[in-house]
Amino acid sequence: MSTANQAAVERYRNNFLKEVEANVEEGHMVKMCMQCGVCAGSCPLGPHWEHSPQKIFMMIRAGKRDEVLGSDSMFMCTSCYNCIVRCPRQLPITHIMHGLANYAHRLGIAPKGQPTREFATLFWNNLTKKGRVNELTLTLRHYFRGGLVSGIKEALAMQGVGLGLLKAKRLNPMEIFGGHGVKDLKGFHAIIAKAKEIEDRKKGFTA
Amino acid sequence: MAKKEYAFYPGCSSQLKASASNYLVSTNSICNALDIKLTEIPDWNCCGASVGYCEGGELPRVAINARNFAQAETHLPGQDIVATCAACWLGARESKERLDASAQLMKETNEALAAAGLHYKGEVNVRHMVEVLIEDFGYEGLKQPMKKSLEGIKFAGYVGCQTNRPFGIDGESFENPMYLDKMVETFGGEALKTYDQKVTCCGGALAFSEPEKSQKQIRDIVESAYDHGAEMIVTPCPLCQANVEVYQSEINKKQGTKFNMPVVYYSQLMTVAYGGSAKDAALNGQLIRAEKLEKIAGK
Amino acid sequence: MADNKFAAYICSGCGIGDAMKVPQLEAIAKKEGKMAVVKSHPFLCNAEGVQMIKDDIANEAVTHVCIAACSRRAKTEAFQFDGVAMSRANLREGVLWVVAAGKDHDEVRQEMAADYIRMGCAEVKKMTQPAGNVKESSSKRILVVGGGMSGMTAALEIAEAGYEAVLVEKTGALGGMAAKLWKRQPFKTPYSAPQEVDAGETAARVAANPKIKLYLNSTIAETSGAPGRFVVKVAQESGAVTDETVGAIVQATGFTTYDTAKLPELGGGQPNVVDQAGLEAMAKAANGGAIKRADGKEVKSVVFVQCAGQRDDTGAHLSYCSGHCCGTSIKQATYFKDQNPDVDTVIMYQDLRVPGMGEDFYRSAQERGVIFTKGKASRVAGGDTCSVTFKDLILDDENTIAADLVVLATGQVPNAGVDLEAWNPVVTAAEGGDEAAKAQRIVMHGSSVLKLNYRQGPDMPQFKHGFADSHFICFPYETRRTGIYAAGPVRRPMDMLQATDDATGAALKAIQAVENAALGRAAHPRSGDLSFPKARLEGCTQCKRCTVECPFGAIDEDEKRFPVFNEERCRRCGTCMGACPVRVISFENYSVDTVGSQVKAIEVPEEDEEKPRILVLACENDAYPALDMAGLARLNYSAFVRVIPVRCLGSVNTIWITDALNSGYDGVMMMGCKKGDEYQCHFVKGSELAHYRMSKIGDTLKQMGLEPERVVTQEVAITDNARVVKLINDYVAELDKLGPSPMKGFG
């Protein structure tokens, strides 16, 4: 047996499955997939995925760690929950996809520059800053994520929308100076910090 | 009927001058008409939304929701938490169900809450405004304060995702929920009998990060409403409302369509049916004006 | 015997009286039908109407009754008169409900009704009420062949129902395959863990049961006779042969595992590659501890290769799915997981098939961490480290996986004895004097299970893939050997739970068979029928068609090659009657004459009247009910057809066709059940035989100067009510184009 073959033989084990079970939100349900493919056919972004949930689950069982954690497929999830309600085995597919994305992101091996990965990070940082989402800064940061020039272009392209929202009193320009937020910001931050600490400890992100 | 009281969780988008402020204004109007008292959860925070998953992780998301629960439990004891935003409802309810199911998660969550001197006992009930309307009032009950009929307007009841899946409204099917149509009919409007895209995803947060992909979704949703003769789309979800309304001009620009389909909240059409003005219904908050609804409001 | 007295009763209820002229029908019954008593009644099936008939039977010595009312399939309880021959003229479903309403159709409707009266009278005059043939000495004991789980269950069920069983087992112990298992698939809630087999306990119950006579180390040397009087020679290890008289037989001879030596590409015969039976032996040896290989090494990783040598489309291996093997591999994977959760267990499947509650068991294995990989193994190499090369069917790539042990999920090969399709040509050659064939006949006979001395061969016919016979679609326990029932994996692939259910079903069938045989009644599907075929041997030409064509092997031949009818084996389908070229075979209540006289009774209009007549011979099992159903749905078909129900299309004698055409009928349509592999014929071969016979009728038609379209055969299912209408109407239209039969006026 060639060494490459030998390596493949060694790799085709359920170790990665155990890793997923231990570290990924709802990861313990991956083993319950029966490979029917209903999820793949129910996803609104189906045409844009490289790997459907069905394939992702099979890849996990097949130990394809790099391919799974490097896939951008999980970031295609719009959180529409169609896969969850249709799964005959009641796998929380949406959550598993979120969990895998989170795990890959935290490990730093998720695809770099993946737009939803970036937006999602921006979103979380925005909401944790003040305890509530600041839609204006979120939007501006999003458009300027690629630098000043492309940001101005994108923002200009969307200015009609922005002006419309402004006129309809659904966008507050004053938000840029702070805007909504929780009063006990200190407590809010303490909760998040503590929760993160517990989770990181459990998942081995901290020593 | 005695006043009904709820702990209100408006969520980030439904604040004043936020993208769903018209949802908030019109919700307040229908609550007046139905004698509902909404009290905001003191110092509530964001639910984390679905897209929070990437950076947030499970426990931080559950913990921030539990913070709201703890506040409600302490300051508004015995009141159901009611959310208007689909994502807030989903995020909160999901957290609540997970906390109910796992003592371990409850323990860790309270460990986190303790950092802010809070504690969650596990007693809240999380509901969506639509649930309150249908379950606590019923279609007949909702009809009581009605002053004007919405006769002559054909609505596409766009339910979307997160008020429908994974929890949904009790007794409704995931594939073809009927409650929006029934509400429309309750107030004299005409609901589309068939609407292929009733529960199609609008793209959610991917409207920002993957505009091409999500605008394809939005295009289908609007096109199908046109195809079946709708004059207006009605929805229960702020992100659905925003995405489907706001991006029509973008799609027109890129694809040469001539979309101009108003997208309103159920609370807006109810406000009009209850005799409220266009201002009460926050119809001035539409990017695409719902003229037929404004006309009835103006009568 | 008292003289026959014929009576006709015409019902005018259900609207018959409004749409038809009943007095005219009465006159026809009297004058043309020559009925001694003719009465009409507005509600014949009510108590008063029925009493009127009963009174006539009691007081007027009426012996034969023609009921002209609804279909023979309706009101059967009301119109049941013991000891009286009865025909039914179908005026309601057959005329009133299918002929278009309105005055325009009054004439054709009345003609149709009149013909049915003529036919009903003609038929009853040719009938004799069968008295039945009660046999005082009929045996009610039941032989069970095979002492595995199916056989033991059958014997116990028979005994518990109060009958005596004789159980013959080839080996020295009861239990069969079941006794070799460590555990069995769960058969009780929550279906999540393997359960004890308890084969030993079942065997002990069999041995201790006073109603079960047990022969171990024994085989069957010969079976002769018929239901109620089988004589079975049981050959014992000692050389002794004991005669056992039994009334019925349950064959539960099980299966053999597919030979892994035929699967070298999947590592068959190589070290550390075993089949599922091999794994059971390893698990038994481990007795709950870690499962060890032949070399003593503890198994830490195992791959189960499903469909090994099964579902094979190359023709090299078994083409079918054995049904139990997915569940068995799941069970075996739990052997490992329950002992040590760290053992890697991979089940490699193409389609996981877990019937019954197996889905719950499948889930429980997933919860244990058994990995299910959808893939097709192309190569297995045995050795110290085994490897399985496969194509991942989800990820669409080639992969190799290593394991300490590979288990091949091979299929079940039935122990069904001699394949009669192979047997018959050998016998023909041997009888022709071929020495090699003679030797082969001896070898084949030696491999027979039942060693029936039937003219049709030593075992029951096989259905598909070598499995013992079964009327797969309608009556799974029925075989074409009356009173002999197949149970368990010999009949079709199955797991133990299905096998025990199967054995229970077969035991009940066998009990029915012995009871029916004692009363001289037919078994399924004409259960309760007391008639049986009689042959006028003085007219017989010893052509053997009846003995060959009887689907049930009911007819033997004597030394002079005359047919010997075994009444108890007969299912009363009449295929022999249809086959007989000299028409010497008949039943008392169903004969060439009872149908032939109906064919001739109708009035065929002259050519210039432009009223064609079409004879429809409809199988009573499916086609006739479909026609009734068409009536029930008020679908209209042509009033030019005259329908005669037949027991089976196989009973149709060609003389009826030629008689009809000679009498000036314009066409004959036969409606039988679906034939072929997916047959629905209640008598298995009847419809097929009829189609075959009719394919040969062309010459006869040519001699008569008639077009081949004048005789057609159709396959009809019981649900085809709309289709039968279309078939009839299309045929009438086709015949209209053909023009009237040139035979008109000669009849």
Image (spheres, helix red, strand yellow):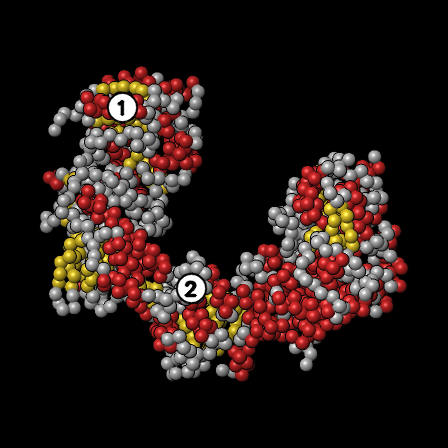
In the rendered image, residue C291, in percent from the top left (x then y), is placed at 41, 77
Count neighbours of disc 2 (C-alpha within 10 A) and say few if under 14, some if 14 to 19, many if 20 or more: many
Local crowd at mark 1 within 10 Å, few (<14), some, or many (≥20)? Answer: some
Relative to residue B241, is residue B145 depicted above or below?
above
In this rendering, would C431 be left or right of C688?
left
Earlier residue among tags 2 and 1: 1
- In space, the residues marked 2 and 1 are separated at their CA atoms by 61 Å
Q: Chain letter of disc 2?
A: C
Q: Quadrant of the N terminus of chain C?
A: top left
Q: Nearer the viewer, residue A20 or C565?
A: A20
SS category of the residue bearing label 1: helix
Q: Is residue B171 visible?
A: yes
Left or right: C618, with A66 as reference point: left
Residue contact between numbered discs 2 and 1, judged by CB atoms under 8 Å:
no
Q: How many marks?
A: 2
Q: Which mark is residue C327?
A: 2
Horizontally, residue B225 falls left or right of residue B275, namely left
Percent across and percent down for residue B280 are: 83, 44
User: Up-down: is A35 above or below C605?
Assistant: below
The amino acid marked with disc number 1 is: Gln
| Picture quadrant of residue B167 | bottom right
Q: Quadrant of residue C630?
A: top left
Residue C482, position as x, y percentages in the image = 23, 49
Q: What is the number of the mark on residue C179?
A: none
| Residue at the spot of label 1 | C51
Reply above or below: A132 against C528.
below
Tag 1 subunit = C
**Left or right of C41 in this view: B136:** right
**Residue A92 placed where, x, y %?**
61, 61
